[in-house]
Image (cartoon, rainbow, N blue to C red):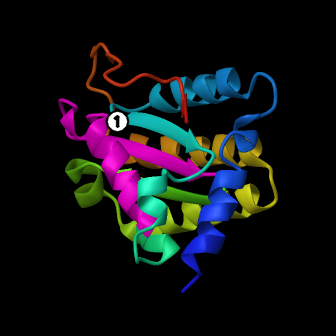
Amino acid sequence: MENRWVRWIRHRWLDDAALRLPHGIVERLAEGIRRCEQGHSAEVCLHIESSLPTSYLWRKQDISSLLQLRAKDLFASKGIWDTDANNGLLIYLCLAERSVELVFDRAVRQAIDAAQWETMLSRMTQHVRSSDIEAGMLELLDAMSILLAEHFPPSPGANLTNEISDIPTLQ
């Protein structure tokens, strides 16, 4: 297990600097989310953090568990579980760890096999590790759109109300 001091230093070092993302990336990612949501009724939320909050860094858990816990906590605090069709999902990106986590509401978890998500997540993680966040995220959104459209097609004549903001949150 990684030394908690080393982890703390890495996360505090990147705390603000890592959120200096390329100009216009938030708008382009929001447009990618809007395009993704056009062909299905699921709700997609993107949260990008430069580093984990200090309260997570001192816990005696491996980093993978901490990232999953943080993603689940954000999923709950943002109310993504509270969509009408229980088909919300969160994409969580932690820049300090160059890691991506996905958290799904129960309808998505029941409808789509975890192996399909793992394939997408693996490709996205490769992009993040090579610092190509935008291309990786847009590729992930395109792949998600196809998969979600198979399982959550919009009802004929349905007004696809946006229950969750398409604008990525940065922290």
Tell whether 7 sits left or right of 53: right
Residue that carries the numbered disc 1 in the rendered image: 42
Say which residue appears at 41% left-offset and 77% top-offset: 61
Residue closer to the observer: 136 or 76: 76
Residue 67 is at least partly visible in this image: no
Residue 111 in the image, given as x and y percentages of width and height: 27, 56
Tell whether 121 sits left or right of 40: right
Say which residue appears at 56% left-offset and 57% top-offset: 100
Residue 151 in the image, given as x and y percentages of width and height: 33, 47
- Taking 70 as reference, is 137 above or below it? above
Q: What span is in magenta?
A: 66-95
Residue 36 in the image, given as x and y percentages of width and height: 52, 33
Q: Is residue 12 magenta?
A: no
- Taking 52 as reference, is 119 above or below it? below
Say which residue appears at 50% left-offset and 38% top-offset: 46
| SS at circle 1 | loop
Say which residue appears at 81% left-offset and 59% top-offset: 130
- Examine the image and state in which quarter residue 137 appears: top right
- Taking 72 as reference, is 60 above or below it? below
The furthest residue to the front = 5
